[in-house]
Image (tube, rainbow, N blue to C red):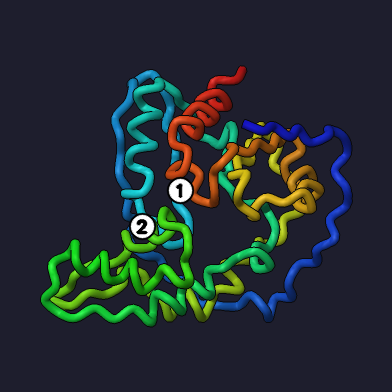
Amino acid sequence: MLLRRLPRGPAPPGRLRPRPPSAVRSVVTSVPLSYGEERGRADRAPLVLLHGLFGSRANLHAVAKALVRGGSGTPDLVERLISVDIAPTSTAPVSEFSAYISAMKSVKIPDGLPRSAARQLADHQLCSVVQHPQLRQFLLTNLVEVEGHYVWRVNLDAISQHLVDIMNFPVFHKPYPGPALFLGGSDSPYIRSQDYLEIQRLFPKADVQYIAGAGHIVHQDKFGEFITAVLNFLTQP
C-alpha cells in the first residue's frame, strides 16, 4: 500500500465560485431509501457505507460483513470519513462513464435466454468498450430480467442527461474538521496529485493512500487490502 500524507497548515483559499441561484433551481422529490443492515456489537455505534454510480447495496454486502467481523465502528455522527477512489473535484476529465453508458444502451439480448447466457452475451458486447473484466462484471449487476425481457435496472437516459452534474463536485467553503482517508487504487485516475490541494483545503486532516494493483472498484480488486486499510483507519485513536 502506498501512503501519501498531505501537509498540515492553513487551508489555501478556495478558487471556486458558488453557482448563481438561477443555476440551481430545481424540483427535488425524495425516493424510498433502499438499504441493508448487518448487526454488529450493541456497544458499537453504526458505520454507514454508501455506494457510487451504477452501484447497489449488494455491492458492499461482503465489505459490511467483513467490517462487522473486524469489530470496528464509528459514532453516529460523522467522526471520521473515508472516500474510496474519488476526490472532491470534478471527475469529468478522467471519467469514461459516458462511453460505458453508450455501450450499455447498445446491448441487445434476445428474449427468453437463461440469465447466465444473457450475462455472457452482454459481457461480450461490452468488452470492446469496457476492457476490464472486473468492471464489466460490476456493470452487469445492473442487468435484470423483467417479464421475459432483459433491461438495465438503472435509468441510463437520466444518468446520461445529468452526467456532467453527477461528475462535478459541489462548492463548499467550510472544511470538514475530522480525520479523513482518501483511499484510491494505484491503477485508477480518480485521485490525482493535482487534487491534493483541494483535498487539503476541504479536509485538512486527510491522508491519501493508494492500494497497489487496484483500479476504481478498490474493494473488488483488492478486497483483503481494502478491509485492512479501512479497519486500520477506523481504529486509530
Image quarter of the N terminus: top right
Residue at x 59% of width, y 33% of height: 80
- The spot of residue 60 in percent (x, y) is 38, 44
Residue at x 64% of width, y 54% of height: 190
Cα–Cα span, label 2 and label 1: 19 Å
Q: Amino acid at mark 1?
A: Leu
Residue at x 67% of width, y 79% of height: 23
Q: Which one is earlier in the sequence, the residue at label 2 or at label 1?
A: 1
Relative placement, left or right, of 59 versus 146 is right
Q: Secondary structure at mark 2?
A: helix
Relative placement, left or right, of 177 versus 11 is left
- The spot of residue 49 in percent (x, y) is 44, 42
- Residue 50's tag is 1
Q: Amino acid at mark 2?
A: Gln
Residue at x 59% of width, y 38% of height: 212
Q: Quadrant of residue 153?
A: bottom left
Say if 139 sits above or below 24 in the image: above
For the residues labelled 2 and 1, say whether their Cβ atoms are less than 8 Å apart.
no
Pointer 2 residue:
137
Badge 2 density bin: few <14, some 14–19, many ≥20, Cα 10 Å: some
Q: Quadrant of residue 71?
A: top left
Q: Nearer the viewer, mark 2 or mark 1?
A: 2
Foreground pick, 135 / 68? 135
Foreground pick, 202 / 90? 90
Q: Secondary structure at mark 1?
A: loop
- Residue 217's tag is none
